[in-house]
Amino acid sequence: MNNANDHVDEVTWENLIPAEHWAVYKCVLDRLAEEQLPFALGGGLALGVYTEKFRRSKDLDIYIVPEHREQVIRVMSECGLDDYFPVKEYVRHWIYRGYRDDVIVDAIWAMANQRAEVDSRWIEGGPMVQMFGQEFHVIPPEELLWSKLYVMQRDRCDWPDIMNLVYAAGPTLDWNHLLHRVAEDRPLLKGVLSVFSWLSPQRAAGIPSRVWEQLGLAVPKPETDPEGRPARKDLLDTRPWLFAEQQLAAA
């Protein structure tokens, strides 16, 4: 579950995850470790690790490779989790949703749109997070961003999450790897970075110039929001949503 050479980020999840929820999560995570089934945590937890903005959730996302899905489903069943499908139907080709009371654990082995399956880098390539005295891998920021590129639906869009991720980690992302992953879907990455360069040109300027050039975008020039009108982020949503900017302002 952990490697002594890996960096461990201190996260106070104890204040966000109720003890009764953690008891369910712990059973699943401990049994996966006992059976040597590699996994990494994702979702809002992973986003919180990179942006340092944590949000409460009743769901825990566990990323696994496809060949382990039946074993992981068995482990979840042994921990008392039932299939969520009879409660609310979901597409089964990429995820298994287990639930107990009001707690949900999602085992994910592919993107919902079948663009890609989880591989070893999803599991092993990210940092470690510490919570409740234990250490776990989280999925890498590049894979987190890649998966969120395709979530743009009428009732849900993950691009605000991408904006927060790029704001927080953009200068240190492995852009070569991300560009390789995105491949022929580069127009999506170009689109989200085009919006980000308008939203926060100062932060966008910290992303290597070669990235903008490879995507056919102008290299951003640091500049402040125009005077006499709302901030750019408020033109999109006046509610608090750009987490890293809030933290910098409060520093």
Image (spheres, helix red, strand yellow):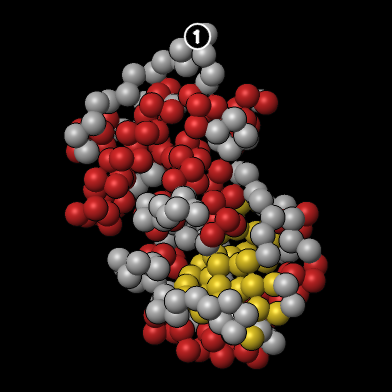
View extreme (right): residue = 19
Q: Which residue occupies 27% across, 30% down?
A: 209
Q: In x, y percent, where is residue 140?
A: 44, 56
Q: In x, y percent, where is residue 176?
A: 27, 47
For the question of whether residue 154 can be seen, the reply is yes
- Quadrant that contains the C terminus: top right
**Within-10-Å neighbours for mark 1: few <14, some 14–19, many 20+:** few
Q: Tell whether 176 sits left or right of 225.
A: left
Please name whichever residue, 87 or 1, is drawn nearer the observer in this view of the structure: 87
Q: Tell whether 73 sits left or right of 195.
A: right
**Amino acid type for the residue under numbered disc 1:** Glu
Query: In the figure, 56 relative to 20: above or below?
Result: above
Q: In x, y percent, where is residue 131?
A: 69, 61
* Quadrant of the image occupied by residue 220: top left
| Residue ID for mark 1 | 227
Please name whichever residue, 37 or 47, is drawn nearer the observer in this view of the structure: 47
Q: Which residue occupies 55% across, 73% down?
A: 106
* Quadrant of the image occupied by residue 170: top left
Q: Which residue occupies 64% across, 72% down?
A: 104
Q: In x, y percent, where is residue 205?
A: 37, 26
* Quadrant of the image occupied by residue 204: top left
View extreme (top): residue = 228
Query: In the figure, 134 relative to 205: above or below?
Result: below
For the question of whether residue 3 can be seen, the reply is no
Q: Which residue occupies 39% across, 84% down?
A: 67
Q: Secondary structure at mark 1?
A: loop
Query: In the figure, 126 relative to 110: above or below?
Result: above
Please name whichever residue, 220 or 88, is drawn nearer the observer in this view of the structure: 88
- Quadrant that contains the N terminus: bottom right
